[in-house]
């Protein structure tokens, strides 16, 4: 056994020297060196004489320094020894603890040999791992749906945004909220509410693709991190169209009633889509933007999916400010109309769609999706809609006069609140009459949401307009809940396949499938199909082959002011419209 440190430090140098030699026989090898040193000292003493004392003192200093170094090394060894003793005490203690834990786990320690300590450690280690994993799962998984929770989602968004910053590969965050979930809870009780959430999570799981990341953020809110890296295009529009299409696909999963054991209910959802800027790195901010888009989806009447737009997504004050500016623009004639050609299979002009434009005095161009939504929410859509319809008629009349093309048609969009206005048909027919546009040349484009809950007023409007010879078109077809059912109830003259399906025709098998189904179905019915959002020749040709009759999109022309459009067809408009 080695002596305690203090005793050792108190021992005289001589005995230490002896022990040193005993423990470190290597020093025996230094013997000839020491003899040579002594011999050298004697020779030097012979020659130096009086300086012998100084020399002896020097040798003594050297020896003392060496002794100190050796002593320090020795001290370190002892400290190491103490540590080892402490560790072995700990090991013994740990071994006892191991035995106790294994006993708790139902493995009596005596059933193991001492040599089986490794086995025990392994057992304990795997047990610990399991416990840690459970704790981690508890912290990252939602217990009701077993989906990753908000914390996990935020972590994932963080990882994705760092990756996106490096590689410029894009992703989108879809914020999904169950409509009127509180009412489900209140009506059927919390157990059914829970089952509804599990049903929602199952439908979402069935929709997401490999590479996407689904999470329950909490309550009735879910989120999907959508991988967009497979999309070759960097165009914001195209990425948004893909994300939008994916949201529509999720929507389609909610068409059927959900069977919740004791009751079957209709679960509706709203989705906010945010194609994440590759330079944004704050996951909370990214989620907030998606949430904002979801709020917009909830408030708009014509669709349950909204795509986040940085330029227009501002707080409530801005929203109100925009409404005030919208009113000014309405008073001062701040709106204009752009017209986009609708062409046939031979690219001959068949008609034009009137699309509203607003150039805000300080914020520049603001898209109709944004300002029409505000007009709906602040209840000025009826007034604005009428004004825009009058502008469409004026523009169309000018274009028709310039092009002199018999049979040229006008398509005009009608918002949901306009359709439920008892005055609508009288006003529209009055305007047509005053402007001199034949109602038979007019197609009114109606979105699914406008006619979902068909009130008697909506019904009367539709009947009267149809009786006057106006055709009806089902716009943005495929993006809503019950597109197919609506064909039966509305009996439209035309279906406009939503541009998100057309844009993704070559990249998304689901989009292609939907377009094929619509094309196949239309041959059985007295209606024609228009594909909007045709941007390239390959898509145009593919759609032609599928039997689509009419086309609209940037491939043929962007929406243009009437004078510019007339000029494209070699005509001149005398008075600017
Ligand atoms: P919408 O009826 O689906 O109109 C087609 C939209 O697709 C237009 O957007 C048009 O500019 C855009 N578009 C056309 N070709 C292409 C293409 O090849 N690629 C892509 N990516 N987009 C294309 P816009 O003008 O922003 O209009 C948005 C929506 O606002 C319209 O969607 C329509 O629902 C509504 N809207 C526009 N004008 C009016 C109006 O006067 N009254 C009403 N009630 N709604 C309107
Ligand atoms: Ca339209
Ligand atoms: Ca459309």
Image (tube, rainbow, N blue to C red):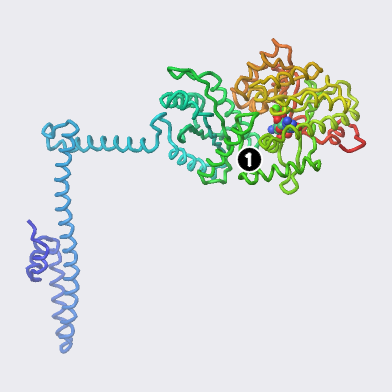
What residue sits right under mark 1 in the picture? 309
Q: Is residue 156 visible?
A: yes
Toward the viewer: 313 or 68?
Answer: 313
Toward the viewer: 348 or 518?
Answer: 518
Toward the viewer: 462 or 457?
Answer: 457
In the orientation shown, which residue stands out farthest toward the right? 574
Cβ(mark 1) to ligand 1 < 8 Å? no
Residue 144 image position (x, y, % from top left):
40, 29
On screen, residue 368 above or below 551: below
Across the whole image, how many numbered discs are drawn on residues? 1
Q: Is residue 537 visible?
A: no
- x 27%, y 38%: residue: 128
In the orientation shown, which residue stands out farthest toward the top? 524
Give the quadrant of the C terminus.
top right
- Secondary element at image label 1: loop
Picture quarter with ligand 3: top right
Residue 32 image position (x, y, % from top left):
13, 68
Question: Is 275 left, or right, of 148 in this rendering?
Answer: right
- x 19%, y 80%: residue: 58
On screen, residue 198 above or below 6: above
Residue 338 image position (x, y, % from top left):
79, 34
- x 88%, y 21%: residue: 406
Residue 397 image position (x, y, % from top left):
87, 29
Q: Residues within 10 Å of mark 1 (few under 14, many from 20)?
A: some
Give the quadrant of the N terminus.
bottom left
- x 74%, y 32%: residue: 382
Question: Is 156 left, or right, of 68 in this rendering?
Answer: right
Question: Is 13 left, or right, of 267 in this rendering?
Answer: left
């Amino acid at each position: 056994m080695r002596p305690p440190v203090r005793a050792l430090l108190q021992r005289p140098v001589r005995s230490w020297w002896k022990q040193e030699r005993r423990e470190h026989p290597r020093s025996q090898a230094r013997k000839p060196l020491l003899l040579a040193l002594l011999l050298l000292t004697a020779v030097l003493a012979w020659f130096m004489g009086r300086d012998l004392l100084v020399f002896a003192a020097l040798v003594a200093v050297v020896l003392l320094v060496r002794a100190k170094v050796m002593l320090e090394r020795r001290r370190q060894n002892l400290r190491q020894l103490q540590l080892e003793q402490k560790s072995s005490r700990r090991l013994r203690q740990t071994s006892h603890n191991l035995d106790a834990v294994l006993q708790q786990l139902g493995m009596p320690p005596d059933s193991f040999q001492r040599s089986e300590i490794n086995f025990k450690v392994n057992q304990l280690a795997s047990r610990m791992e399991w416990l840690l994993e459970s704790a981690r799962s508890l912290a990252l998984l939602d217990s009701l749906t077993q989906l990753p929770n908000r914390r996990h989602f935020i972590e994932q968004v963080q990882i994705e945004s760092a990756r996106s910053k490096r590689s410029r590969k894009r992703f989108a965050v879809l914020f999904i909220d169950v409509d009127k979930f509180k009412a489900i809870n209140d009506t059927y009780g919390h157990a059914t509410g829970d089952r509804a959430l599990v049903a929602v999570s199952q439908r979402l799981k069935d929709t997401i693709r490999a590479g996407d990341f689904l999470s329950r953020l909490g309550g009735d809110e879910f989120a999907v991190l959508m991988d967009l890296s497979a999309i070759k295009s960097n165009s914001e529009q195209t990425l948004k169209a893909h994300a939008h299409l994916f949201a529509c696909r999720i929507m389609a999963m909610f068409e059927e009633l959900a069977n919740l054991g004791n009751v079957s209910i209709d679960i509706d959802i709203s989705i906010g889509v945010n194609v994440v800027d590759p330079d944004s790195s704050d996951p909370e901010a990214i989620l907030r933007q998606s949430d904002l888009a979801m709020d917009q989806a909830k408030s708009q009447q014509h669709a349950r999916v909204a795509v986040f737009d940085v330029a227009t997504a501002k707080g409530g004050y801005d929203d109100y400010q925009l409404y005030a500016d919208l009113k000014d623009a309405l008073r001062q004639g701040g709106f204009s109309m752009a017209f986009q050609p609708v062409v046939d299979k031979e690219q001959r002009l068949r008609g034009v769609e009137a699309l509203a434009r607003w150039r805000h005095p300080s914020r520049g161009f603001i898209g109709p999706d944004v300002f029409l939504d505000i007009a709906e929410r602040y209840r000025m859509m009826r007034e604005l809609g009428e004004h825009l319809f009058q502008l469409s008629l004026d523009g169309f009349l000018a274009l028709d006069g310039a092009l002199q093309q018999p049979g040229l048609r006008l398509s005009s969009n009608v918002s949901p609140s306009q359709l439920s206005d008892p005055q609508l048909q009288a006003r529209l027919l009055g305007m047509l009459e005053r402007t001199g546009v034949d109602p038979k040349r007019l197609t009114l484009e109606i979105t699914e949401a406008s006619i979902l809950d068909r009130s008697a007023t909506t019904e009367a409007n539709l009947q009267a307009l149809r009786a006057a010879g106006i055709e009806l078109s089902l716009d943005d077809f495929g993006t809503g809940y019950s597109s197919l059912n609506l064909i039966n109830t509305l009996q439209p003259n035309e279906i406009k396949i939503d541009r998100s399906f057309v844009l993704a025709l070559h990249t998304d098998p689901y989009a292609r499938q939907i377009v094929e189904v619509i094309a196949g179905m239309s041959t059985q019915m007295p209606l024609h199909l228009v594909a909007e959002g045709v941007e390239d020749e390959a898509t145009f040709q593919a759609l032609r082959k599928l039997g689509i009759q009419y086309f609209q999109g940037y491939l043929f022309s962007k929406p243009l002011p009437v004078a510019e459009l007339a000029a494209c067809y070699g005509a001149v408009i005398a008075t600017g419209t």
